[in-house]
Amino acid sequence: MAPGQYVQGRGVVDLVGAKTATLGKKAVVVCDRDVIPLIRERLDHSFCDAGVIARIHPFSGENTLATIEALTAWAREQQPEVVVGVGGGRALDAGKGVARRLQLPFVSVPTIASTDAPAARGIGIYDEQHRPVVVEQLERNPAYVLVDTEIIANAPKRYLRAGMGDAVAKKFEAEGCWRGGGLTKHGTPPLRSARLIADDCYELLRSHGPAAMRAAEAKLVTEDLECVVEASLLLSSLAFENGGLWIAHSVVRGLLLVRGAKDALHGEQAAYGTLVQVTFEQRPDTEIGELRTFLREVGLPLRLADLGLSDPSEEEIETIAAATAASPYIASQAKEITVDRVRHAIREVEARSAREVGAIGHGR
């Protein structure tokens, strides 16, 4: 499963009109309210030049079922042929929700690279407290994913870092799903090609991640930043949709239930979940060390305190472990995953981080 076409580079947002026109001449655009002042003029010119009539609706807040239904009612009145989403993950998911209900093609225009959702079928829907309610699926992936790396480079660098956290999990999850006889979220067997893509994704992140963060700090479009954006938005999506999710993203479901950690970005949570997974699997110490080094170099979490959960209680660790073990992402796995084993893995991650922090402090 893959988007119809993925286009990335400087100035790509100016192609939105021409690409949309191949799908229809009337469009509704769900656009992140904060992005509108920065991008409205370029969108208007692009649609006008392509002969597309586009109605833009500002989006803010949570992507709830009620929000999607209200947007759909507005969109239906416009009688569109295409739905375009512009902005961060919530605005894109809202646009996807509208496209799904109107059974129309969807054009994805992400303005940050914080998760791989822009190229994926999934639609994350939450309540007003940002607690997950349901994940719907588009009938097919976005027809176009248009990624303007100049816009990405000018976004807060924390989003680029989070995108790497979401993407780094995919190598380990694709391998775990394959070995465990699991299924993808679409109920299909994982593909060998997905593991190859996930491996490539991981290598790109490791090779270019630190330099990409420096580029983001300077708001520069460099080859390193281009590589990381492609890994985080495209390769990561291809890997998980065709290779499956496993423990790392199951841990995220638990982190959403505890103080502090629930307010972290998804990719930050997924990075920590990856540490729990590789510890659970008892992977070689060299492999775990390599992963930890990468996370440290780009500034991703190595312990619960880094997510905002300082001094986690036994009850909080139990909550994370229980939600992980009950996650639908691991329901199809042959390998037994119990609350006790997940709890033990979390404690091991925390203990290792504490030893490393102590060693650094002693070295000083």
Image (cartoon, grey):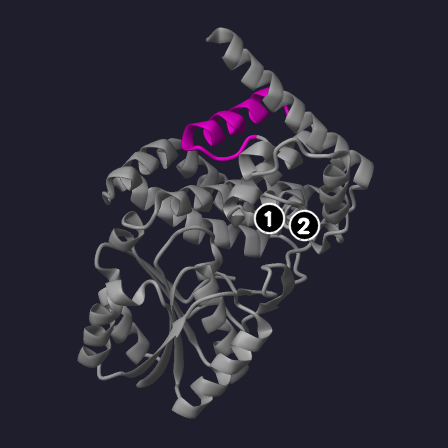
* Tags 1 and 2 touching, CB below 8 Å: yes
- Whichever of callouts 1 and 2 sits on the residue coming sooner in the sequence is 2
Relative to residue 289, is residue 145 depicted above or below? below
**Residue carrying label 1:** 262
Q: Position of residue 122 (x, y in %)?
A: 55, 64
Task: Name which residue lies at 61% across and 33% down.
Answer: 310
Task: Name which residue lies at 48% across and 58% down.
Answer: 117
Outermost residue, top side: 363
Task: Name which residue lies at 61% across and 40% down.
Answer: 273
Q: Position of residue 202 (x, y in %)?
A: 47, 38
Residue 87 relative to residue 139: left or right: left
Q: Which quarter of the picture shows residue 205?
A: top left
Residue 96 visible: yes
Relative to residue 226, is residue 98 depicted above or below? below
User: Mark 1 falls on what kind of element?
Assistant: helix
Q: Position of residue 309 (x, y in %)?
A: 61, 37
Q: Which quarter of the picture shows residue 42?
A: bottom left
The amino acid type of the residue labelled 1 equals: Lys
- Residue 134, numbered circle: none
Task: Name which residue lies at 59% across and 51% down.
Answer: 243
The amino acid type of the residue labelled 2 equals: Leu
Q: In front here: 139 or 179?
A: 139
- Residue 257, numbered circle: 2
Region of the chain picked out in magenta, as a range: 284-302
